[in-house]
Amino acid sequence: MKQSLENTAVLFVDVINDFDFEGGDDLLKHTDEILPSMKKLKDFAKDNELPIIYINDHYGLWQADFNKIIDRCKNDRSKHVIDALKPDKHDYFLIKPQHSAFFQTPLQSLLRDIGKTHLIMAGIAGDICILFTAKDAYMYGFDMHIPENCMASEEKEGSEYALYLMRTVMDAQIEPV
């Protein structure tokens, strides 16, 4: 990674997910494909003492309590993903009302307060929530690295197009973890 780790934070977007919607089976299949890389990224962050910030859909609970979101989302299909990637007491956890992790959340203030200007973004869905988050991060002046093997969408083509946009329009580094 070309950026200094001192100014780096890792964002995990919507990794606590129930996959209970139209297209959820496809998203789960593609999430399973990136799960080893996501775990590797989480381990890298922990080993290098990088802050990990989870930003997740609220699932109608409107409480930034990851245990409540996990209880709401955990089912037979999602359990292995949630167990592998769930936050711990040292991680930050924010809820979001819509696609972008920045929209109506304290993420920008948190990042500025902890002095982070470079973001490693990972999660699901790449062609929606990661893309919208990257657009806002770019507009706010953050440098970005989006590991292509740490992002899943319902359709592979959606991820590929989102990665193309993030690389060409938002100047994000796109390379594997």
Image (spheres, helix red, strand yellow):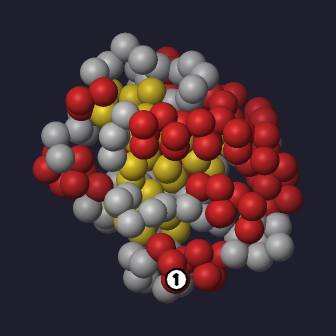
Q: Residue at x 59, y 36 (%)?
A: 40
Residue 109 screen position, x and y as percent: 19, 54
The residue lying furthest to the front in this view is 47
Q: Nearer the viewer, residue 118 or 66?
A: 66
Quarter of the image where one finds residue 88: bottom left
Q: Please name the residue shown 60% across and 64% down the image.
A: 16
List the residue tagged with mark 1.
Answer: 68
Q: Residue at coordinates 65% horizontally, 56% vertically from top-left?
A: 84
* Quarter of image, res 139: top left
Image coords of residue 114 (percent x, y): 17, 47
Can residue 75 be seen here? yes
Q: Can the viewer see residue 154 in this picture?
A: no
Give the total number of marks visible in the rendering: 1
Residue 71 position in % (x across, y down): 61, 82
Q: Nearer the viewer, residue 111 or 90?
A: 90
Looking at the rendered image, the quarter that the C terminus falls into is: top right
Badge 1 density bin: few <14, some 14–19, many ≥20, Cα 10 Å = some
Query: Judging from the image, what secondary structure is the residue with disc 1 in?
Result: helix
Q: Report whether 47 appears left or right of 34.
A: left
Residue 122's place in the image compared with 157, above or below, is below
- Tell me the kind of residue under disc 1: Lys
Nearer to us in this view, 83 or 175: 83
Find residue 161 and report its horizontal and vertical position in percent.
66, 29
Residue 70 sits in which quadrant?
bottom right
- The residue located at (24%, 31%) in the rendering is 7
